[in-house]
Image: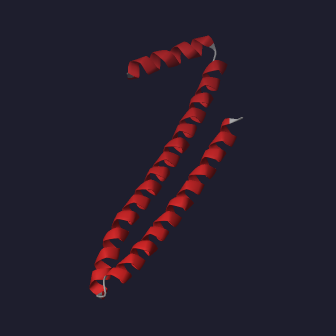
């Protein structure tokens, strides 16, 4: 299996998990709303309970997606770095030995 297809499978599973988390969050909010309506008669009491639960659930769902986006950004940056490194190695391999020595000396003087 190639790395592109494994990344594609990972992306698909992350999308499924994300969708599942959103659905579970909505079901929980609906369930909490239903229980609150049956338990309390005052709209302000129901609103207080539902808003507290929605805040927690929304924070958890948002954190999940934040981590997913951060991970995707890191993967993209790693892939770009690997591509740049491969290009640099190919250019270095094509250099004449005397030119390579000059470049190495210049790089050493920069550090």
Q: Residue at x 53, y 42 (%)?
A: 75
Seen in the picture, residue 71 relative to 41 is either above or below; the reply is: above
| In front of the other: 48 or 107 | 48
Query: In the picture, which quadrant includes the N terminus?
Result: top right
Q: Residue at x 58, y 55 (%)?
A: 15
Answer above or below: position of 102 versus 6: above
Residue 78 spot, x, y in % from top left? 53, 38
- Asked where in the image residue 43 lies, by quadrant, the reply is bottom left
Residue at the extreme front: 39
Percent x, y for residue 46? 32, 81
Please count the marks in the image: 0
Residue 94 or 10: which is nearer the viewer?
10
Q: Position of residue 90 (x, y in %)?
A: 64, 25
Which color scheme does this rendered protein use? secondary structure
Q: What residue lies at 57% left-to-right and 33% top-to-bottom?
A: 82
* Residue that lies at the very extreme toward the right in this rendered image: 1
Q: In this view, which residue lies farthest toward the bottom?
A: 42
Tell me where residue 60 appears, x and y as whole percent: 39, 59
Q: Is residue 20 above or below residue 50?
A: above
- Locate the C terminus by quadrant: top left
Residue depicted at 69% across the width and 42% down the height = 5
Say left or right for 86 vs 60.
Answer: right
In the foreground, 17 or 73: 17
């Amino acid at each position: 299996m190639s790395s592109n297809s494994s990344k594609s499978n990972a992306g698909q599973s992350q999308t499924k998990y994300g969708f599942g988390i959103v659905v579970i969050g909505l079901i929980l909010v609906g369930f909490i709303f239903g229980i609150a309506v049956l338990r309390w008669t005052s709209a302000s009491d129901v609103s207080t309970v539902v808003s507290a639960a929605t805040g927690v659930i929304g924070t958890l769902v948002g954190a999940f997606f934040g981590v997913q986006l951060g991970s995707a950004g890191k993967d993209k940056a790693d892939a770009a770095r690997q591509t740049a490194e491969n290009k640099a190695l190919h250019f270095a391999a094509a250099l004449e030995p005397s030119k390579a020595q000059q470049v190495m000396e210049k790089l050493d003087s920069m550090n």
